[in-house]
Amino acid sequence: MIKEIQLRISLKEEEKEDILLMKSARILEISPKDITGVKVLRKSIDARKPKIILNYKIAVYIKEALPEASEYAFEYQDVSKAKEIHIIGFGPAGMYAALRCIELGYRPIVLERGKNVKDRRRDLKAINQDHFVNEDSNYCFGEGGAGTYSDGKLYTRSLKRGDVRRIFENLVFHGATEQILIDAHPHIGTNKLPKVVQNIRETILNFGGEIHFGTRVTDFIIKKGNIKAIQLNNNKEIPVERVILATGHSARDIYYLLDKKELALKAKSFAMGVRVEHPQHIIDSIQYHCSGPRHELLPAAAYSLVEQVKDRGVYSFCMCPGGFIVPAATTNTEVVVNGMSPSKRNNLFANSGIVVEINVDKDLQKYDHYGVLKGLEFQKDLEKLAWTAGGRTQTAPAQRLTDFVEGKLSNDLNPTSYQPGLRSAPLHSLLPKLIGGSLRTGFKAFGEKMKGYYTHEANVVGVESRTSSPVNIPRTEKLQHPEISNLFPCGEGGGYAGGIVSAAMDGERCAEAAIKGL
Ligand SMILES: Cc1cc2nc3c(=O)[nH]c(=O)nc-3n(C[C@H](O)[C@H](O)[C@H](O)COP(=O)(O)OP(=O)(O)OC[C@H]3O[C@@H](n4cnc5c(N)ncnc54)[C@H](O)[C@@H]3O)c2cc1C
């Protein structure tokens, strides 16, 4: 017999061996000897009160063996002679589109502008140390897309759009820790993601798919509402039948290309702001109500904040406890920051994007002449402004949090995890008022909600500009572009995902849609 129960375990109890088994026996009023094993289904931390509690949902196996295998099986088949589907971009959307093609008996041909995870690492080093951004290989472009050197948080709100568990199980199948199946806020970590991505590549190649790195798509040859061929950066042209476009939201050349070809696009609302960085111990002390170091069983504390400022949302985005701020620009004349953390989340800093909602219809009138690309142009201008204020390198403009809110230039800055370095700049006056003003009010409100958060020991760093796509590539119910019937806009670049898991789920759906009728 299997019984599912909830357990509340204190930190002191958590230190004891077999606590879950012993407590289950007590609650179920059975002998511990009758329990063959317990399986943790969910684990979360309740730190609302000073006495911190670990909430467990567990399955108790009573006189019954624990299952050995996962109920999810991934049955890949040899597709080396099967019909081809072309996939542009090998981020989470492209990877999961390719895997799904193989499961369904089709041969994915992946075209990726960036390098494989190993070679890509050298380009990341060049950004951090030499301030040189390779426009095809950086934190956004390359094998695994923006998902590889990301934080690897697997939280998604897209629960209705697909089977989230299936994506998690598949990540585990490809080497991610089983802990992601249990944690309420699952996280892989930037140090573990490249191996998972590499394993996914090997599955695709082993079963007959193709992946071409260093291969940027530069044009579409369109005839009678169909893409007949794709042009590549080496001037080669390849014929295609079905194309999944999974190029992510940083592939501006793709938006420009579609716009030039007068294909339907829509301007989309998005959010922009800064990244704030605190010493991790400050966030721990607020969230865990402790004055010294956090309990050794507790992970680096996270937070999630939201405030309405004059009907405009100001909120934390991609919070990375124990993490690093990273330079996520895709060209040399812009500065973009983002965050990531290793699996242990053991760095000394806590960083988070703090962003402001931008309503593309109401807020960007000055950019109206750019038409559907107005959000993109606004985003570009802000990134260029950050680059100029940072000193025209990957050094990022920054200010102490309290100086930013009070409107003062910082004489000096706090230590940071951002490797290219920070430069003091008056972000409070440089950022457009709708962003700067909303952030300043928002930060004050956050300080009220989390006592100790509003501190001169934190830096704000500019700019957090790539939260989601400023452009939507429309698609019909069959997931086809309305004017090009064999083009399937997919993932974050199309405006259909906002993170690793939702992009992966959209990749699967696009693969299913693309093979229909082939
Ligand atoms: C530093 C950082 C941290 C992040 N942390 C998290 C996190 O913790 N959790 C989370 O859910 N999300 C996180 N994200 C966001 C997440 O990575 C993206 O939402 C996700 O990767 C989007 O997937 P995608 O496949 O749609 O696009 P992308 O991952 O952007 O992949 C697109 C791919 O297309 C390729 N490409 C672009 N143009 C062309 C072209 N013309 N020809 C050929 N190839 C092309 C690119 O090189 C890229 O590899 C983070 C992002 C960054 C940068």
Image (cartoon, rainbow, N blue to C red):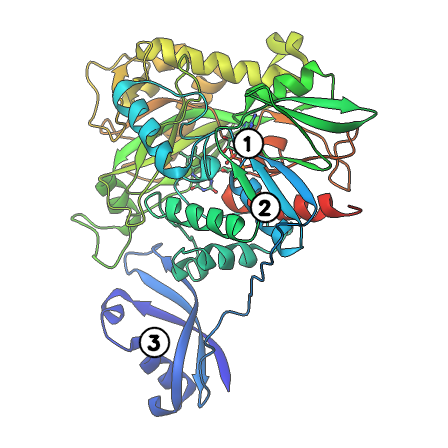
Give the answer, above or below, for where 512 lies relative to 211: below
| Residue 401 visible, this orientation | no
Which label lies toward us, 3 or 1? 1
Compute the Cα span from label 3 to label 2: 40 Å
Q: Residue at x 57, y 35 (%)?
A: 492
Viewer-nearest residue: 129 or 30? 129
Give the answer, above or below, for where 494 lies relative to 478: above
Q: Residue at x 60, y 58 (%)?
A: 77
Q: Residue at x 54, y 14 (%)?
A: 378
Viewer-nearest residue: 21 or 473? 473
Q: Amino acid at mark 3?
A: Leu
> Mark 2 Cα within 10 Å, few/some/many (few <14, many 20+)?
many
Q: Is mark 1 within 8 Å of ligand 1?
A: yes
Q: Amino acid at mark 2?
A: Ala
Q: Is residue 506 left or right of residue 272?
A: right
Mark 1: which secondary structure? loop
Mark 3: which secondary structure? helix
Q: Are marks 3 and 2 in contact (CB under 8 Å)?
A: no
Instruction: Give the residue pinned by disc 3.
Output: 20
Viewer-nearest residue: 72 or 345? 72
Question: What mark, if any, has residue 142 been given in the picture?
Answer: none
Quadrant of res 377: top right
Viewer-nearest residue: 247 or 396? 247
Q: Is residue 109 left or right of residue 37?
A: right
Q: Is residue 109 left or right of residue 341?
A: right
Question: What mark, if any, has residue 248 been given in the picture?
Answer: 1
